[in-house]
Amino acid sequence: MQNPQPGYAQRFEAPGYATALPIPFVRASLGGRTVAYLLDILFIFGFTALLTLVITVVGVVTFGLGWTLFAVLPASGIIYSAITVGGPKQSTIGQRMMGLRTVAPESGARVDVITAAVHALLFYVAISTFLLWCVDIAFGLMRSDRRLGHDLLLGLAVVHAR
C-alpha cells in the first residue's frame, strides 16, 4: 500500500490490479482535466466557426456541392481532439494550458490520430448520458491514478507534461 498523506485514510488497493502509473508519469488531477475541457470548449467553438467559414466558401466555389461538408460539423470536437491529441504535443490546447498530455501509460508512446479520435468519441458518448458520465467519473474518483472509464478502455492516461 502507498503511504497516505497526513489526514487521509489509507487507500484500499486490490491485489493483482495495477492502480498506479509507472514511475516516470505523474497523474493529472480531475480538476485540471475539467478546467482543460472547459478551455477546450472555447477552442472547439472557434474551430467549428472556422470550419463553417471554409465549408461556406467551398460551397460557393463548387456551386453548392461543397455544402454537403456541413455534415462533418457535429464531429468537430472529435476532429479537434484527433488532430491535437494525435499530434506531436499529445494534448489539446486546453490540456497544454493546464500542463497536461495524453500518453499510453505502459510505454509512454504517443497516441495516434485514430486512438485520439476514439478517445474523444467515448468521452462525448459518456457526457451525453448522465448515467454513463457518472460511471466514467466514478472510475476516476476511485482509482489512485485518476484514469477515467474511457481512458481505461483505450489504455491511455492523462498525465502532467514535463
Image (cartoon, rainbow, N blue to C red):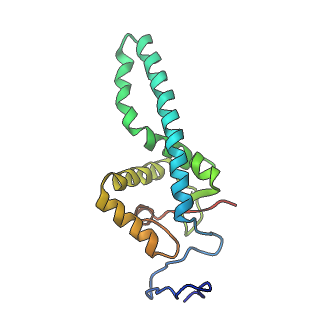
Camera-side residue: 125 or 90? Answer: 125
Q: Is 23 left or right of 41, judged from the image as shown? A: right
Camera-side residue: 43 or 107? Answer: 43
Q: Is 36 left or right of 136, judged from the image as shown? A: right
Residue at x 53% of width, y 72% of height: 145
Percent from the top left, x then y, of residue 106?
Answer: 55, 70
Residue 86 in view (yes/no):
no
Residue at x 54% of width, y 49% of height: 85
Q: Quadrant of the C terminus?
A: bottom right
* Most distant residue in the front direction: 7
Percent from the top left, x then y, of residue 86?
Answer: 54, 48
Residue at x 58% of width, y 60% of height: 109
Residue 33 in view (yes/no):
yes
Q: Is residue 65 above or below residue 101?
A: above
Camera-side residue: 103 or 32? Answer: 32
Q: Is residue 17 above or below residue 120?
A: below
Percent from the top left, x then y, of residue 142?
Answer: 44, 75
Percent from the top left, x then y, of residue 45?
Answer: 48, 36
Camera-side residue: 111 or 158? Answer: 158
Q: Quadrant of the N terminus?
A: bottom right
Could you say which quadrant of the image residue 15 lies in?
bottom left
